[in-house]
Image (tube, rainbow, N blue to C red):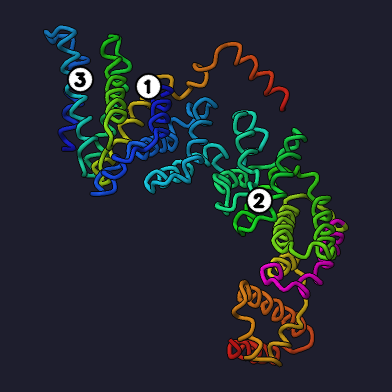
Amino acid sequence: MYLAVQRLISIAQRPVTESVEAGAESDGSCDLPQALAMHLLKGLVHDASLSTALLHPELMEPIFRLSIELFDHPHWAIRNAALQLHGSAIPRLAGPHFNKTTAELFHKFPGLEEFFLNKLIQRNNSEELVGSGLIPSLSLLCRLAPSNDPVSRNETFSSRLTHLLAHPVSQVRTMAARSLLAFMPLYKTKWKTILLCDETISLTSDASNSGQTNRLHGQLLVLQEFLGRCRAVALSVEDWQTIREAVSALSGIEQTQPCYYVKLAVLQLFKQLGMAGNVDFFKQQLEGGEVVRRQLHQQPGFSDWVILKNKFFFSFINSILVFIAPAQNGTRLQSHLFKSYVDCH
Amino acid sequence: MQESGNLAVQVAFMLLNDNQLTLSEVERRSRIEECVRVVYQILLRCRHKGAIEAASESMGLLCRHLFASKIESIRTIPRNALLEFLNRLESTQSGASVTRRSAGLVFLVVKIVSSEPGEKSSKVSIYNPFKLFNKFLLDLFYL
């Protein structure tokens, strides 16, 4: 198997000559040997009977690196084959239930640590919005489980991923936020969550950070991920109260920020904690009506934000009706409100 | 096509196991290679999904028996078939078709590789004793 894998990798890494490429593209009846070699590697990686034998650093590391490096190959068939190979390699590296820790992965495949660190460096290249291999690397990192050791590795990766939270591409921010969970030990979850709340508030209050919308959005995405993890950690009632107070301080961001993606991220935090949020916008909708909606519906992220906002409002109304209205009248009032909502939209 | 592959495998089994055949070792090996070539060609050229899947199972079964043979020249037959395929892939400028005619190539490689004895625990066979001891110490450290 070692021989077969090595030869397939060498075939896949061969440069594509112009004559071959022209011939392959002209009639479309032939696959490039590079693409075929990667499909064969995918078959080997995917085969359950070879799963143990293939999990060797001398085999799996070159395969994984190959799958990432050919993601930006000019030929479509090779990019497609690299994507499929990458998709097969991830469950092998991250475990069938994505429960492999970072320590286990980098202990077994030490060469991947430096490889990932190089991919996470944000390069100031005006031609490329997303660095080569960045998203494929993040797609594995975000599937790893956290470990406590070593501290230096956790800090190095956390630092690189934190820089990516300000990336102009939303998908990179989202994946970097998820990947940060893998490099933060569980016992630090509560501390990190409260720290993130404080950092978010200071980010908005600092006047010099006026162009930091992407950074703010990334920060809120990380906060969402950590709030999700808080449920997996045994926090006390007092801890939850502390977290709720810290998150409720973000309501000012939801009111003042012009970007609806940021507003939506704040509302999603409130939703995670079962908090009501501010309901003034709904009153503004009813009063301003069609004019308000026409002005705002062109804004990116507005539709998702207003749906969640209205859900909050109806939850708020519902919670009041449970106490003040008898069952029958309350139902009638709810129907009337719902009808008004539907007519508005 | 499906039954042809199965028949070729059955003939190969007879050639492997029947000691009463008056064939020299070279002739026996040559006939077995022809049987392997039948299945090899089905995997390389056939478009029918059922035929490809049947041929892949036949190839896996046949390779396991070949690898288990006591005769060295017969044990090398699957390896030679794989090397021939890899050489063909390396030497030709264009590979197989993008149609299903090439669907059997993955099965060909996977079945030969997975049939090799000791592949499932090959991580032991690849390590030398010093690397094993080093790995043991590292595992203790991380526990």
Residue A18 or A331: which is nearer the viewer?
A: A18
Residue B68 or A289: which is nearer the viewer?
A: A289
Q: Which residue is mark 1?
A: B116
Compute the Cα span from label 2 to label 3.
54 Å
In the rendered image, the vertical position of residue A224 relative to residue A64, given as above or below = below
Numbered label attached to residue A265 = none
Q: Which residue is mark 2?
A: A176
Task: Answer with mark 1 or mark 3, whichever residue precedes in sequence.
Answer: 3
Compute the Cα span from label 1 to label 2.
41 Å
Q: Mark 1, chain letter?
A: B
- Under mark 1, the amino acid is Glu
Looking at the image, residue B22 sits to the left or right of residue A94; the answer is: left
Residue A57 or A147: which is nearer the viewer?
A: A57
Query: Can residue A250 be found in the magenta stretch?
Result: yes
Compute the Cα span from label 1 to label 3.
17 Å
Residue A277 shows in the view: no
Q: Main secondary structure of the magenta part?
A: helix
Crowding at mark 3 (Cα within 10 Å: few <14, some 14-19, many 20+): some
Query: Can residue B5 be found in the magenta stretch?
Result: no
Q: Which residues are magenta?
A: A239-263
In the rendered image, the vertical position of residue A238 relative to residue A94, given as above or below = below
For marks 2 and 3, give the one nearer the viewer: 2
Q: Which residue is mark 3?
A: B33
Q: Mark 3, chain letter?
A: B
